[in-house]
Image (tube, grey):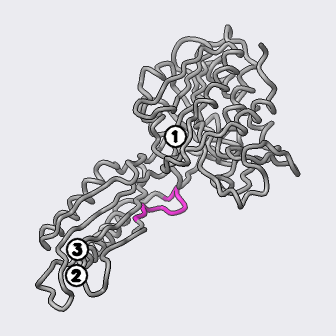
Amino acid sequence: MPTPDLTSMLRGLIETPSISSTNPELDQSNQPVIEHLANWLEDTDFTVRQLPVPGHPGKMNLIATLGQGEAGLVLAGHSDTVPFDEYRWQHNPFKLTEKEGRLYGLGTSDMKSFLALAIEAAKTFDAAKFKHPLIILATADEETSMSGAVALCASDLSGARYAVIGEPTGLKPINLHKGILMEAISLRGQSGHSSDPSLGNNALEGMTAVMTELIQWRKELQQQNQNPAFAVPVPTLNLGHIHGGDNPNRICAECELHIDLRPLPGMSIEHLRKEIHQRVLDIAGKLKLQATFNPLFAGIEAMQTDASSPIVKTCEQLTNAKAGSVAFGTEGPYLKQFGIDTLILGPGDIGQAHQPDEYLSLDRIPPTIEILKNLIQKFCVEE
């Protein structure tokens, strides 16, 4: 059976819901999307594997390979979307709608469309002419837990040397981005009547000491770590949420703070989390408070691919743009851990991501396909 035309593939992906959410009532399986991709790729002579994500029922990764050998090219994207604000959309989020030079629908920009464009580019090639394989990778749950990327192992991508992830960058090559971790810090003291502070131990007051310490630590981090490649050239630490106590006439027994930390390349998520814990524990010990921690988001390491890498140089030439940076995280670090030089480059715009009436401009489609064809030619046929 011939592979569907591009519009049919785009329609199939957009009109098949695959919402990833931390809210179980909104979360959906991505398996129907993966099955669409598998069918189309098998019709294009790819060898296709559908891999269940351990511990996440209904979630699947797809790895499709055309050609054999090593040092191949990965074209990667996530198959899930975020939830949507139903009453703020003027177009049906689950219907591909063309209007005024745009394709509207949930996932058009971020980033289901890229997977269809990758297939469209790949189906023009004869695998018999490949010196290195082409791998199309579709993952699960990028928008929440990154469980799909976490589940990947080196053997899954053993034939890969270079990768392009089609996140929305406006067709500008991105070779570095910040990392992210989110942590909940809880302090527990002792409640008591507010008329006599000796009757309790105020966790809210203890948290003010924690916040003061974290703000001071942020200054130290920003003095020690700077990268002018980023619009915000320093790591950021945001104190985003706090809740404590239940009444003004009771000593606050429990207080919780949520923080968001965005490190630069070269800063370790594990090391930073340990540093946070130690600083909080030191304060809690002095104030005789109990401290506990909960990772709200396990974290994504920052990513940096050397500017001299062939994938960076080639994408700069094809886009006529110098590789740059973004503040959002991607699955890039998970591919980099396998020794795969990874670049972020996609036709969507981050300003459209997670927005009502998300769209992809039609004029981005032809240049994206041409760029992908050139990448396949260089890294699978010529090299």
User: Label 1 vs label 3: CA separation?
Assistant: 37 Å
Residue placed under numbered mark 3 in the picture: 253
The residue at the far bottom in this view is 195
Q: Which residues are magenta?
A: 228-237
236 magenta-colored: yes
Amino acid type assigned to the residue bearing label 2 in the image: Ile
Disc 3 residue crowd, few under 14, some 14–19, many 20+, Cα 10 Å? many
Picture disc at residue 251: 2
Q: Secondary structure at mark 1?
A: loop
Q: Residue at x 28, y 50 (%)?
A: 271
- Residue 380's place in the image compared with 277, above or below, is above
Using the rendered image of the protein, determine whether residue 336 is visible from the camera's viewpoint: no
Which element type, helix, strand or loop, lies under badge 3?
Answer: loop
Residue 281, percent from left and from top: 18, 63
Q: Relative to residue 121, is residue 253 depicted above or below?
A: below
Determine which quarter of the picture holds residue 367: top right
| Quadrant position of the C terminus in the picture | top right
Quadrant for residue 20, please give it.
top right
Residue 152 placed where, x, y %?
44, 29
Residue at the spot x=54%, y=29% of the render?
A: 162
Depth check, front residue: 18 or 358 = 18
The residue under label 1 is which amino acid type? Asp
Residue 158, x across and y down, in percent = 46, 20
